Image: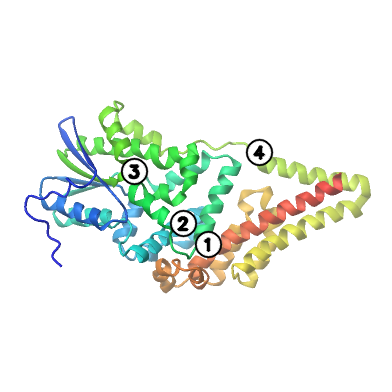
Amino acid sequence: MNTTPEAGYDGLHDQPHTIVERDGVRYTLLGTAHVSQASVDAVNAALFTGDYDTVAVELDEQRHRALTDPDALAKLDLFQILREGKTGLVAANLALAAYQRRLAEQLGVEPGAELKAAAVGANKRGLRLSLIDRDVGITLKRAFRGLGFWGRSKLMAGLAASLFADEEVGAGEIEKLKQGDFLESSFGEFAASNPPLYRAVIAERDRFMAARLRQVGADGARNVLAIVGAGHLKGLTEHLRQDQDAPAPTLDELNALPPASNIPWFTIIVSVFLLGGFAWGYQQGGLELGGELLLKWALVTGIGGAIGCAVAGGHPLSILAAFIASPLTPLHPALASGNVSAVVEAWVRKPTYADFLRLRDDTATLKGWWRNRVARVLVNFFLTSLGTAIGVWTAGIYIIGKLG
């Protein structure tokens, strides 16, 4: 089939778009649907005109690499991920990738295909390519820190559930994706109803991409084609027209992570509760009651973490590590049972290069998460952490009952 656009057709007239002229630069903003062949055709048609010297796309370095480099996942350093505490972030990215894969299988169009077409097309034509979106890791971290305890719990539960989802994507979700933004649609109604999450995932990125476009213009571009999700078109246009602050300070502000509290209140509260409970038990019932509370805590939390690790298909040594680390997890972040058991699992059952190569395909199915050694380490992290959390709450309720 011939996909070469007809002469004189720029692909814009039947697609949502705006044109903004500012500071001597003409910005053509093409709003696309991330699951639409029409959007792919519109991008190719716009590039075919030769009217642009720069192509800007709604991608960051990580997403660009994932779209254009088939071996990107094979280059992951699993131990570095575990050491730097990025296990949850990598798992979340894989969950989003699995969601994309299910969409591609249903619709016959790879989600983000129009962004890939823009990036590849720019390189083929020798045009400057600018990645204007914020790093997805920073976006998720800013969203996470802006949520309260229950909001974080709901977000983590949703991401964890999406790790193992294997069903077709509903028609309602697909329609939202055609009209909006991939990250927003991935979080569903939670993004729309939760202001901190919406601000980080949508509103802040509108400001960020507008600042990046102005920066691109300041670097010498004169006619820029910007490919962005249709959900960003209105906000991005307004910021590009109205914002007066210099781009660099705006980018620094939106790239910064909100300061975490220097006081580990949760650890302090749990430590005081546990030590106070054990001391009270010793005072009231001597070594027998104090020892009983301590033993119950160790057994219940340890068994909870061990069961989670076992469900994840952990090696016996990983299960033992989870059992030992779980009672200590609330006392210090470095002792988190999920990280400890995941490190042991990766050490005992070292992932092969083939595991990394198959990671994208394996994580598209539920069984694949357990079959692939890289993915199973991530499952180990999540389920061990979940089992420990259940054990902590169960043991805490038991101790409270004894104190009463």
Residue occupying the point 80% across, 52% down: 398
22 to 345, vertically: above or below: above
Could you tell me if residue 46 is visible in this image?
yes
Kind of residue at disc 4: Trp
In the rendered image, residue 293, in percent from the top left (x then y), is placed at: 83, 53
Q: Give the alpha-carbon distance from disc 1 to disc 4, as whole Å.
A: 27 Å
Kind of residue at disc 2: Val
Q: Give the alpha-carbon distance from disc 2 to disc 3, as whole Å.
A: 25 Å
Mark closer to the chain start, 1 or 3: 3
SS state under label 2: helix
For the residue carrying disc 3, how many other residues have a C-alpha within 10 Å: few (<14), some (14-19), or many (20+)? many
Q: Depth check: 398 or 151 in front?
A: 151
Mark closer to the chain start, 4 or 2: 2
Residue occupying the point 46% across, 56% down: 90
Mark closer to the chain start, 2 or 3: 2
The reply to whether dot 1 and dot 4 touch (C-beta < 8 Å) is no
In the rendered image, residue 75, in percent from the top left (x then y), is placed at: 38, 63
Per the image, the residue denoted by label 1 is 378
Per the image, the residue denoted by label 4 is 265
Per the image, the residue denoted by label 2 is 90
Residue 231 is tagged as 3
Name the side, left or right, on which 203 lies relative to 120: right
